[in-house]
Amino acid sequence: MNTSTNVDPSEISKFSALAHRWWDPNSEFKPLHAINPLRLGWIETFITLLGKKTVDIGCGGGILAESIANRGADTLGIDLSDKALKVAELHALETGASVRYRSISAEALAREEAGQYDLVTCMEMLEHVPDPASVVQACADLAKPGATLFFSTLNRNLKSYVFAIVGAEYILRLLPKGTHQYAKFIKPSELARFIREANLEIIGMKGLSYNPITQVYSLSDDTDVNYMIAVRKPLA
Ligand code: SAH
């Protein structure tokens, strides 16, 4: 696929329309706020963030990017929703977080800055793009040899359909209807194939489980719905 077309404009407008609500912890982005300390903590079990040159792909309003920057990483967030990036920039001004943002695709940045990053994160984004393998390849290209990368997305099975679409969008109304398209969910085996094809090595995997009764997310070994994969780019 031509990398300049690896974007679904309807996905970008969906996130742009909600952009002003990004930092409202009770908004549509509540789940991202809830999982952020968990995913940040998991990332820190693999690497120390201080001083790491980091790029966060599909950063949206900057929930993950800001938290990484606040740990002392030299952080760039990229997205194709200019509205989300504006919100991210304003929020960083307010909080004083030292993070930069750019409106550019992963593939285009990889052509400019190949091999420059110690840490690449790409979370809750792959299920919104037409060709996720191309984004994984771009992340691999951005990484230095020995760098660590993190991907997260939604698994594709009956349980993830029930939890992520029926439960989250229709019953609990955590997310607006139409936030996620089931067909674009990615099985761990598929993501693992994209990762292998990009010559990266998997070093860890975790589930993020939601308990609808307590309304609490936790890290778990249940990768049936939300899951994260940690990856290393081999040295040389
Ligand atoms: N990664 C953030 C935000 C996830 S929401 C977090 O986990 O907190 C998904 C984001 O992906 C949105 O901001 C959306 O604009 C962005 N996105 C969707 N398609 C994209 C593409 N092709 N290139 C870059 N960003 C994209």
Image (cartoon, grey):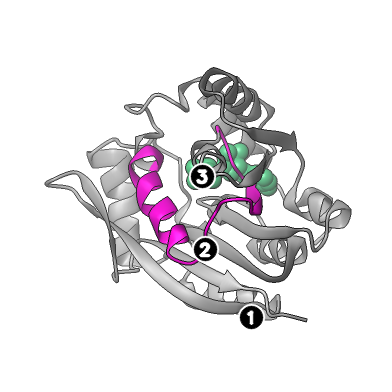
Q: Position of residue 37 (x, y in %)?
A: 37, 46
Seen at 52% across and 63% down, the residue is 47
- Relative to 145, residue 225 above or below: above
* 103 sits left or right of 44 in the view: right
Distance CA(mark 1)–CA(mark 2) = 21 Å
Seen at 45% across and 40% down, the residue is 178
Q: Secondary structure at mark 1?
A: helix
Report the residue marked by disc 3: 71
Q: Position of residue 215 (x, y in %)?
A: 19, 43
Q: Are marks 2 and 3 in contact (CB under 8 Å)?
A: no
Seen at 67% across and 66% down, the residue is 133
Q: Nearer the viewer, mark 1 or mark 2?
A: 2
Tell me the number on the disc at residue 232. Answer: none
- Relative to 48, residue 157 above or below: below
Start and end of the magenta stretch?
32-61
Q: Nearer the viewer, mark 1 or mark 3?
A: 3
Residue type marked 1: Arg
The answer to whether residue 41 is magenta is yes
Q: Position of residue 92 (x, y in %)?
A: 57, 26
Q: Position of residue 3 (x, y in %)?
A: 81, 55
Tell me the number on the disc at residue 196. Answer: 1
Distance CA(mark 1)–CA(mark 3) = 30 Å
Q: State whether label 3 is within 8 Å of ligand 1.
A: no
The tag earlier along the polypeptide, 1 or 3, is 3
- Taking the view exactly as shown, the residue that stands out farthest to the right is 112
Report the residue marked by disc 2: 47
Residue type marked 2: Ile
Q: Are marks 1 and 2 in contact (CB under 8 Å)?
A: no
Q: Ligand 1 is found in which quarter of the picture?
A: top right
- Taking the view exactly as shown, the residue that stands out farthest to the left is 213
